[in-house]
Image (cartoon, rainbow, N blue to C red):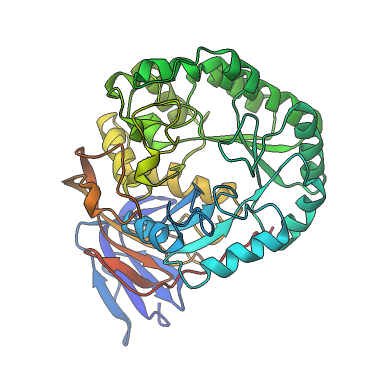
Amino acid sequence: MSDAELVLRSTRVITPEGTRAASVAVAAGTITAVLPYDAPVPEGARLEDLGDHVLLPGLVDTHVHVNDPGRTEWEGFWTATRAAAAGGITTLVDMPLNSLPPTTTVAHLRTKQRVAADKAHIDVGFWGGALPDNIKDLRPLHEAGVFGFKAFLSPSGVDEFPHLERDPLARSMAEIAAFDGLLIVHAEDPHLLSSAPQQGGPKYADFLASRPRDAEDTAIAQLIREAKALHARVHVLHLSSSDALPLIAEAKAEGVRLTVETCPHYLTLTAEEVPDGASEFKCCPPIREAANQDLLWRALADGTIDCVVTDHSPSTADLKTDDFATAWGGISGLQLSLAAVWTEARRRGHELADVVRWMSSHTAALVGLDTRKGAIAPGHDADFAVLAPDETFTVDPAALQHRNHVTAYAGRTLYGVVKSTWLRGQRIVADGEFTEPKGQLLTRTH
């Protein structure tokens, strides 16, 4: 520890080996050692004594719609990364759509990177997009450093990002498998969606009926068949249907290269409590019933579901009308994801270390950043969140850092107050005060 510039000391440090009292030494933005709590502080090093607050690795959120450039009035890199930092997230990976242009060519990627470069309060990476007509662009995007490719099996909601029907999906997956890339998929079957009842209006029950579970289940089954045939790496985005879990578990047991995520809103909100007309709760796939939620939690516990990400998908407030058919579908939860998941996890008997595994170490591994991110361990970036896990707060939308103060969590009392967030050994937010942007742009390295 002789070269340490900074030492963070806590009675509760979450490490890969378990939670323990420890002193974490940092030099040049990197963790150099995790030592006993009472290890002497070297001369010249600054000590940050965190007391009983928990020191955990900064969260890695691999599913965020920043919408910048082009729809920056919906969000933007400045506001999204501030919200993330306020919630203990130190790395995010930006989705390729809802921005203009979408990240579907190298030129578009470069545009995104230029826009983000001086606005990012945390580290930012990028997904590419797989469209019916851009197969030729997939390998160049991979070589340019995107972390994988997003595809929709049903309409995306924006015209510039069309979905893949069966044959284009197979061709895109084959191309991505050829360079061992990762395909991440919004899995809902468009034919089952179009045949479901489409009532429109303010009743949440009608909206839920319009996005049936079997649309997810059928699309996931198709993905598994294609991935198995091509030995491709496939990731299922924002799983909401518990009916798909046996199929997923069977595929994993057979060696299919399949990973799965779910989201805080599926784990903490239920269809039974959504008020009619409250489209701040609208997302696709939808928030389902409490019994479905219980099975998602069970699948998280046994590893069938790998990780939890926000799918932060904001819009301007005027697009959140009281008609569920026409309102924008997306939930703003970036700043609140850690507290929301921890609140429900603790109620169900899980440990904070479980939340770290789902929201930091496993997400870092998904995008190949696990040698740098997602753990308090020597050689990793000194990215931390300092959490008071037993303190509560009531969600005030006006106090959020998101550009548009619309949230399904308004008025909820949540456990887990983020006291400070650190990026490569520098405190970037504490008690609501932010430093200037210090984030770096990340690219895939292997």
Which residue is more in the foreground, 142 or 68?
A: 68
Which residue is more in the foreground, 176 or 405?
A: 405
Give the left or right position of residue 110, taking residue 120 as reference.
Answer: right
Residue 118 visible, this angle: yes
In the rendered picture of this protein, how many numbered marks are placed on residues? 0
The image quarter containing residue 290 is top left
* x, y percent for residue 283: 44, 32
Give the left or right position of residue 346, taking residue 215 as reference.
Answer: left
* x, y percent for residue 227: 74, 31
What residue lies at 43% left-to-right and 43% top-to-bottom?
310
Residue placed furthest toward the bottom = 44
* x, y percent for residue 353: 36, 44
Which residue is more in the foreground, 386 or 188?
A: 188
In the rendered image, the quadrant that contains the N terminus is bottom left
In the rendered image, the quadrant that contains the C terminus is bottom right
Q: In this view, does 220 lie above or below 212?
A: below
What residue lies at 54% left-to-right and 53% top-to-bottom?
94
Residue 388 visible, this angle: no
* x, y percent for residue 28: 46, 79
Q: Is residue 74 above or below residue 201?
A: below
